[in-house]
């Protein structure tokens, strides 16, 4: 069973914004390898000229008038946030000085 | 019979005639929950006060001469994947611990408007990822038929609650089998509607091209009753279809003579346990006795359903679950963080369980530069071949029939350490989601003393037809009336 390399796991974890422990990196190398080996069954299938599925049920764009409607109450919405200041979500500094 | 043993349509008749009040029904169900919940562990939260208040309102309306709808006063359990205003909604995840949505999912609002008291929120695999409900971050739900076995998943809490008499009906969601497989393993009926038939506004998204909300119930008639409440266009969900909704109860004529059924050979292969296969074959024989023309069909691309699903669903999940970042709601790390990206990564690493982390990683990989064409795009193209197999089969068959699950309920812990084995639980249900079609699971016999489910698949938006077939089977048999001895 092929292992996925440590570098690939670390790169994908960075893309996914997921902090992993050392044990987890090793577990994921094995498990991703196993699942991708299974997924490789697909590689032999001829899909020449076959379109990828985008919608299973035929669908077209849905348009509506741009009208004012009821919105959620701001205090109720921010009530679930871990850190709030004056109805704003607070996060660590993003922009450098 | 005790009130908690009755179906929704039986309760509906008694409520309409004034034989019982909605408050009496709700109190009887909560008494049953008190009696067996310690063994089953189906619920993550109970909303008794709210339910009794809703029941009182229904009774007041009836006392005032109003005729509220057929399900007014019939209580319902809600899978914890659906937003309920002001009521805990965790998706079975630590990352949403303590989350109280500021709004109701459309299906939840529709149930409220129909006068259905909400009993509480049912347990599930974290973010609906799993087939046993063992991936819940909070508790393990047990199968009422055998407390050492799983109820299936991911809507295992809803299925176990209905089977145990803790709810006459419940809502679930189905991305790869999450309504039908637990319905099968718990000996009840469950419907995954056509993609677009039921609004998903307020359904916490797992895989957006596959997810649907649907009912779990003690019989098909109850599924039809609940579908009359759920189905229809919702301006809040652009993928909900603007197609007329039939009266699903009126469609239960009991007459299936002349209907043509196909049995896909690929879903009756060696992956199916022999005892399960024998029970399903007997059920297919009964459908033939009811006047249906049954024949085997070949759908060769169904063999690729599992690998397609395990690329498409995680890819969509990786995108959908990006919203859990410790900023707007949910868990935020208490560790020291270097910057905002570190805050995201640590919060997510701590908040998601192992199966969710695995699927996020798998999906992110399948979408990442250099692998997108080989994995994600390839899977979506093979998905088209699977859909074409269904189109061809439905050209000369009205319904397709298969087992719902290749096995009966398995032991708690038995497959927990083997993700690939666990995924095989969904081999018969996954193709349905990939094609977007509706499918029903009904109990059709017992193997090893445990319930076996029969899957009835239909053309898009032909829920009425598969419900008619399932109901006709239940009029002729009594597997749906069997209850676990709890």
Image: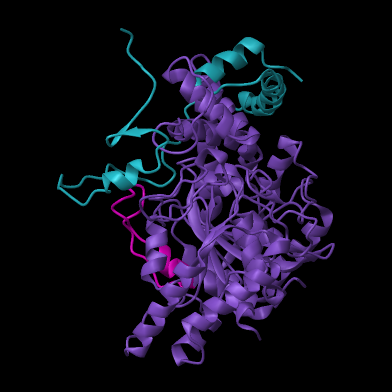
Chain colours: A cyan, B purple
Which quadrant holds residue B231?
Answer: bottom left
Which quadrant holds residue B35?
Answer: bottom right
Q: Between residue B69 and residue A36, name the one nearer to us.
A: B69
* Quadrant containing the C terminus of chain A in the rendered view: top left
Image position of B54 with respect to B237: above or below: below
Residue furthest to the top: A97
- In the image, residue B239 lies in the stretch drawn in magenta: yes
Image position of B33 with respect to B103: above or below: below
- In the image, residue B228 lies in the stretch drawn in magenta: yes
Image position of B88 with respect to B35: above or below: above
How far from the left and from the top, in percent, is residue B36? 70, 68
Q: Residue at x 64, y 38 (%)?
A: B306
Taking the image as shown, residue B410 lies to the left or right of residue B265, namely: right
Q: Residue at x 57, y 21 (%)?
A: A19
Task: Please state the extent of the stretch shown in magenta in the rendering.
Answer: B225-248
Q: Between residue B280 and residue B45, name the one nearer to us.
A: B45
Q: Residue at x 41, y 41 (%)?
A: A55
Taking the image as shown, residue B472 lies to the left or right of residue A53, namely: right
SS majority, magenta: loop
Q: Between residue B28 and residue A27, name the one nearer to us.
A: B28
How far from the left and from the top, in percent, is residue B475? 63, 80
Q: Is residue A46 visible?
A: no
* Quadrant containing the N terminus of chain A in the rendered view: top right
Q: Is residue B76 visible?
A: yes
How far from the left and from the top, in percent, is residue B158? 59, 60
Taking the image as shown, residue B291 lies to the left or right of residue B8, namely: right
């Amino acid at each position: 069973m092929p292992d996925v390399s440590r570098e690939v796991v670390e790169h994908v974890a960075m893309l996914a914004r997921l902090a992993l422990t050392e044990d987890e990196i090793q577990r994921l190398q094995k498990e991703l390898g196993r699942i991708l080996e299974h997924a490789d069954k697909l590689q032999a299938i001829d899909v020449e000229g076959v379109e990828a599925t985008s919608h299973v049920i035929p669908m077209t764009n849905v348009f509506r008038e741009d009208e004012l409607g009821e919105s959620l109450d701001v205090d109720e919405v921010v009530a679930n946030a871990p850190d709030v200041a004056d109805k704003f979500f607070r996060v660590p500094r993003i922009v450098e000085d | 019979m005790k009130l908690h043993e009755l179906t929704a349509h039986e309760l509906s008749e008694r409520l309409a005639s004034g034989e019982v009040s909605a408050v009496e029904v709700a109190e009887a169900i909560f008494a049953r929950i008190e009696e067996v919940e310690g063994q089953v562990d189906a619920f993550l939260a109970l909303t008794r006060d709210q339910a009794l208040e809703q029941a009182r309102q229904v009774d007041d309306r009836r006392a005032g001469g109003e005729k509220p709808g057929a399900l007014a006063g019939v209580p319902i359990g809600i899978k914890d994947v659906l937003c309920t205003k002001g009521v805990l909604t965790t998706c079975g995840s630590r990352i949403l611990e303590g989350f109280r949505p500021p709004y109701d999912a459309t299906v939840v609002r529709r149930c409220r408007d129909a006068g259905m008291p909400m009993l509480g929120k049912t347990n599930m695999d974290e973010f609906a990822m799993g087939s046993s409900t063992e991936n819940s971050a909070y508790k393990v739900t047990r199968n009422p038929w055998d407390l050492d076995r799983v109820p299936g998943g991911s809507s295992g809490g809803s299925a176990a609650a209905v089977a145990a008499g803790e709810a006459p009906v419940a809502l679930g969601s189905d991305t790869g089998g999450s309504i039908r497989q637990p319905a099968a393993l718990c000996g009840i009926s469950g419907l995954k509607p056509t993609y677009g038939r039921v609004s998903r506004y307020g359904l916490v998204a797992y895989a957006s091209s596959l997810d649907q909300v649907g009912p779990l119930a003690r019989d098909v008639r109850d599924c039809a009753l609940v579908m009359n409440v759920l189905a229809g266009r919702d301006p809040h969900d652009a993928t909900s279809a603007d197609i007329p909704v039939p009266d699903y109860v009126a469609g239960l004529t009991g007459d299936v003579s002349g209907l043509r059924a196909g049995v896909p050979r690929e879903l009756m292969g060696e992956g199916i346990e022999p005892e399960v296969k024998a029970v399903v074959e007997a059920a297919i024989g009964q459908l033939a006795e009811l006047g249906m023309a049954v024949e085997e069909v070949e759908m060769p691309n169904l063999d690729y359903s599992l690998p397609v699903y395990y690329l498409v669903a995680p890819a969509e999940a990786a995108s959908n679950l990006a919203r859990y970042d410790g900023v707007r709601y949910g868990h935020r790390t208490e560790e020291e963080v270097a910057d905002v990206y570190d805050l995201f990564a640590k919060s997510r690493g701590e908040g998601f369980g192992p199966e969710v982390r695995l699927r996020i990683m798998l999906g992110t990989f399948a979408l990442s530069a250099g692998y997108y064409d080989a994995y994600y795009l390839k899977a979506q193209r093979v998905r088209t071949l699977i859909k074409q197999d269904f189109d061809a089969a439905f050209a000369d068959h009205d319904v397709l029939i298969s087992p719902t699950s290749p096995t009966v309920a398995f032991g708690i812990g038995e497959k927990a350490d083997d993700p690939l084995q666990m995924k095989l639980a969904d081999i018969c249900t996954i193709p349905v989601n990939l094609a977007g079609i509706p499918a029903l699971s009904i109990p059709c016999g017992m193997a090893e003393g445990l319930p076996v489910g029969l899957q009835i698949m239909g053309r898009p938006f032909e829920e009425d037809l598969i419900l008619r077939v399932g109901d006709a089977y239940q009029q002729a048999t009594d597997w749906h009336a069997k209850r676990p001895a709890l």
